[in-house]
Amino acid sequence: MNEHKARFSQPKRELYGLFHALKASQYWLRGCRNLIIEVDAKYIKGMLEHPDKVPNAAINRWIEYILQFMFKLVHVPGRIHGPNGMSRR
């Protein structure tokens, strides 16, 4: 992550991570109908459900790209999500 992206707010960073992961894996995920995305950030679901409330053009482009995929977004609480504990040490 470059210096500019490192200064993103936490919600923007989380959404960018999802965008980047889908973009990097797009060739394997296009057309996948049973895709389940597990996140520990509840606000991502709100951002994806209400893109009109996000005033940032870059974030709107990311949301538009993310919504091209057929997926179910599942919230996994941080205390249950295994990698989360390791990343916060």
Image: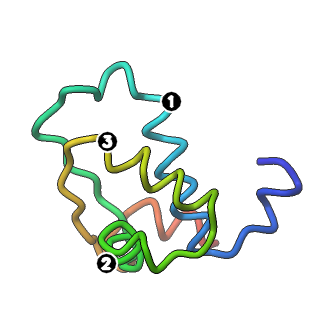
Q: Residue tagged by mark 2?
A: 77
Left or right, 1 with reference to 89: right
Q: Nearer the viewer, mark 3 or mark 2?
A: 3
Quadrant that contains the C terminus: bottom right
- Residue in view at x 32 percent, y 50 percent: 67
Of the numbered discs in the image, which one, if any, rests on residue 24? 1
Dot 2 amino acid type? Pro
Q: Nearer the viewer, mark 1 or mark 2?
A: 1
| Mark 2 closeness class: few <14, some 14–19, many ≥20 residues within 10 Å | some
Q: Residue tagged by mark 3?
A: 68
Query: From the viewer's perspective, is residue 86 above or below residue 9?
Result: above
The number of callouts visible is 3
Q: Nearer the viewer, mark 3 or mark 1?
A: 3
Left or right, 39 with reference to 30: right
Q: Earlier in the sequence, mark 3 or mark 2?
A: 3
- Say whether marks 3 and 2 touch (CB < 8 Å): no
| Mark 3 closeness class: few <14, some 14–19, many ≥20 residues within 10 Å | few
Dot 3 amino acid type? Gln
Q: Quadrant of residue 81?
A: bottom left
Dot 1 amino acid type? Ala
**Gap in Å between the C-alphas at discs 3 and 2?**
25 Å
Q: Secondary structure at mark 2?
A: loop
